[in-house]
Image (spheres, rainbow, N blue to C red):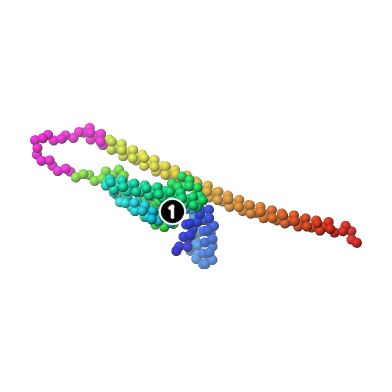
Amino acid sequence: MDLADSLYEALPSDFVRARNALVKSLKIAGNRAEADRISRMARPTASVWASNQVARRAADLVGRLAKATALLQSGIQRDRDRYATAINEHRELLNQLRERVEQALADGGLRAAPPVVTAAVQNFRAGLTDEAVRPLIEQGRLERDVGLDAGGGLFGMSAVDPGPAPAPAPAAAPSTARAAVPDPQKERDERERERARAKARADVERRVHALRRSSEAAAAGRARHESAVDEARRRLESAEQALAAAQAAESQSAAALAAAESELRRLPDEPP
C-alpha cells in the first residue's frame, strides 16, 4: 500500500497537517525520497477530493462509466441506434455520479456548490478519456482537476463526420422509361441545410466549452478563497489560544496579588 494513500481521503482542510506529519515521520525513518515526493503533493480542491471519495466508494459505477466512455471513443457514431443507446447510458451514469459527488461533499461537511459539483463530474467525464489519467480516476488518487481537453475528447471521431461515401448504385437495366433527372436546386438546398446544421452544432460545442472553462475558473477561484478562509481560521485559532493563555496568566497574577495584599493586611503595622 502506498504510504500516501491515506492523504487522498483527508479533507482539504486537514490535508496540509496530515501531509506534513507523514513527511516528518518518513524523514525520521530515513525515507527521504518518499518524503520529498509526498511533500510536493498540493492541497486538493473540494472537487478533486469529492472525485476521489466517489471513486473509492462507487468503483463499480466508475467502471461502468469507463466502459461507456471507451465505447463512445470507439467511433460508433455511424450506428445510430448503438450511438443513441451509448449516449443515453453515458449521460445517466454521469447523473448518478453527480448525486454521489453531492453526497460525498455533504458527508465531508463541504458545501456542494454548483461549480464544485460540475468540476468533480468533469473530472470523471474528461479524465476517463485519457489513458494516463484514467488509472488515477479509477483508483481515487487524483491530485488536480482534469482539463477539458484531456484525452482528446470523448468521441473517437468527429460528430459531424459524414462517414464513408456510399457505394455507387448498380447501373440500371436499359428501359424505355425516362431516367430521373437530379434537381440541382434540391441538391444545393440540402447541402446548405447540412452546412447550417454543422455550423449550429459547432456553435453549441463552442458555447459548451466556454461555459466549462468558466465553471473551471470559478471552481479554481472558490478553491483559492477556501484556502484563504482555512488560513484565516488557523490564525484565528492561534490568536484565540494566545488570548486564552494571556487571560489565564492574568487570572493567576491577580490571584497572587490578592493573596499577597491579604497577607500584607494581616501583618502588624509596627514591630512589637
Tell me the amino acid under the disc marked 1. Val
Q: Judge by depth and name the residue closer to the eye, 27 or 264.
A: 264
Image position, residue 161 (x, y; %): 28, 44
Say whether residue 181 is magenta. yes
Instruction: Look at the image and say whether residue 25 sits in the magenta stretch.
Output: no
Quarter the N terminus occupies: bottom left
The residue closer to the viewer here, 71 or 33, is 71
Residue reaching furthest to the right: 272
Residue 272 pos. (x, y %) = 91, 61
172 relative to 231, above or below: above
Read off the magenta span. Answer: 168-191
Q: Residues within 10 Å of mark 1 (few under 14, many from 20)?
A: many
Question: Residue visible at 45% across and 54% down?
Answer: 53
Q: Secondary structure at mark 1?
A: helix
What is the x, y in percent for residue 191? 26, 37
Residue annotated with mark 1: 54
Q: What's the residue at 71%, 54% (across, down)?
A: 250
Query: To which quarter of the image does residue 169 belong?
Result: top left
Residue 206 location (% of width, % of height): 38, 41
Residue at 16% across, 34% down: 181
Q: What secondary structure do most residues of the magenta stretch adopt?
A: loop
